[in-house]
Image (cartoon, rainbow, N blue to C red):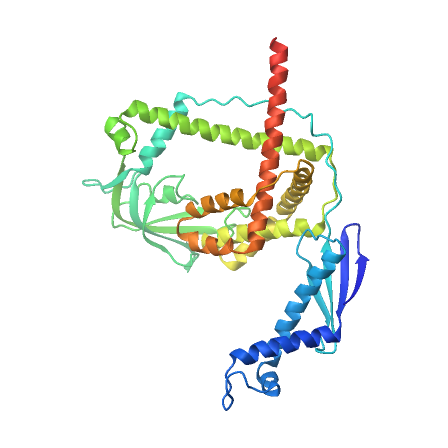
Amino acid sequence: MNVNIESTSALGRKITIEVEPDEIKRELDRAYNELRRGVVLKGFRPGHAPRNLLERFFGDQVRSDVIQRLVKEYTEKALDENALKPVVEPEIVTEETELPRTLKFSAVFDVRPELVVKDYEGLKMPEETVEVSDKDVDDALERLRERQATLKKVEGRTVVQEGDVVLATVEAFEGEKSLMEGKAENRLLEVSKRSLAHGIDEVLTGAELDREVRSTRSYPSEYDDKDLAGKTVEWRAAVKEIYERRLPPLDDEFAKDQGDCQNLAELRDRAREGLLAQARAEADSRARQGLLDLIVEHNPVEVPESMVAREQRGMEAELAATLRAGGLSEEQVAEQVRASAEEFRTRADKRARNTLILDALSEQEQVEVDDEQLAERIGLILRQSGRGRDRLADFYSHEENREALRRSMRREKTLDSLLDKAKQRSREDAQSASA
């Protein structure tokens, strides 16, 4: 193996590798011998098919597999021998692939910057006071009631009122052209601004049963929904049934139905405890980020471009999946992803910077996550995954995915440890001041 290493930038590296012909021949022979044992060709006993026929029928696939294996093997070997650790999987560029005579390729990647984190040992972080008011508890119980509401068909009233739930068909037109891929037909809709966009709640309010209502609305050119932006739209709606949402009474019986509560007072206590736990978790999250921001501010670091690009691609893929699930077309998805590119770039840079700092701190503080802790976290993820359990179990059966989770857990553990120490310093200061 002939290896040449170039520095393309302060953090960029390019390794050019040329595999010796003897090594290529060895791998080809191994691949064809393995293929011969498993393939059956007419006229030949299993395991006795001649090499020339195997090359004729399977040569392209074998060469592709051999190239893939050799590229992986020799890239890992070159990185290990030269103590190079890419921050992101190297980009492979094949240059010569005339097997078995030659195989030449390049691996292009960024290395992790050398970093010693400073000025973090004495940082302090006062604990945020967390409170839950009676109104917060009332609101939480009201949301619980709403989740358990039932619908009762309205008798004796034929006109829709705000807050009703209706069985209706709704469609939008520009002239006689429908603006919807498929009209909302026989849908249950809550007639409220929180549930219906584009002013459809106003179209439905006052509508009569079994009589089509039409209402024209104009939308500004900068309107969020690009299908409606700058257009004058006629909404057509027909209501078939009207329902009222009935909330269960907030009493001791309701409390008993929630489990582990004997009366309303106990349910209120449980709701308060849940809100306090949530508020404390949110306060801790803000404190972690605040502490990390301080550490990053004190430790400027050059961020590898490939790290930022990977983080940005992940954000874009997440947004695209959400938009597709919401029914947007591929054109709309691409447009919104493009519109978010600058924001994603900024967030990706910050996320990559945080990762570099936390990884360096994990090394300095000698923070480790053992196999037992890793297995416990994977078990928790699988228990909470519902119908996606099998898919996630397969995902974490791969070593690289388990190691990625281990690294993430190390960062969490490191930041939690630093936050505990910063809070303790603040408590000690407060005690000294009051003494």
As drawn, is 284 to the left or to the right of 173? Answer: right
Give the image location of residue 76, x and y in percent: 69, 60
Q: Is residue 159 above or below residue 84?
A: above
As drawn, is 43 to the left or to the right of 60? Answer: left
State the quadrant of the C terminus. Answer: top right
As drawn, is 253 to the left or to the right of 286? Answer: left
Q: Is residue 162 visible?
A: no
Q: Residue at x 26, y 44 (%)?
A: 242
In which quadrant of the rendered view does residue 191 lie?
Answer: top left
Q: In the image as oriented, which residue stretches furthest toward the bottom?
A: 43
Give the image location of residue 311, x and y in percent: 62, 49
Q: Is residue 430 above or below residue 326?
A: above
Q: In the image as oriented, which residue stretches furthest toward the top?
A: 435
Q: Is residue 5 visible?
A: yes
In the foreground, 428 or 272: 428
Q: Residue at x 64, y 52 (%)?
A: 310
In which quadrant of the rendered view does residue 193 lie?
Answer: top left
In the foreground, 179 or 97: 97
Give the image location of residue 189, x and y in percent: 33, 45
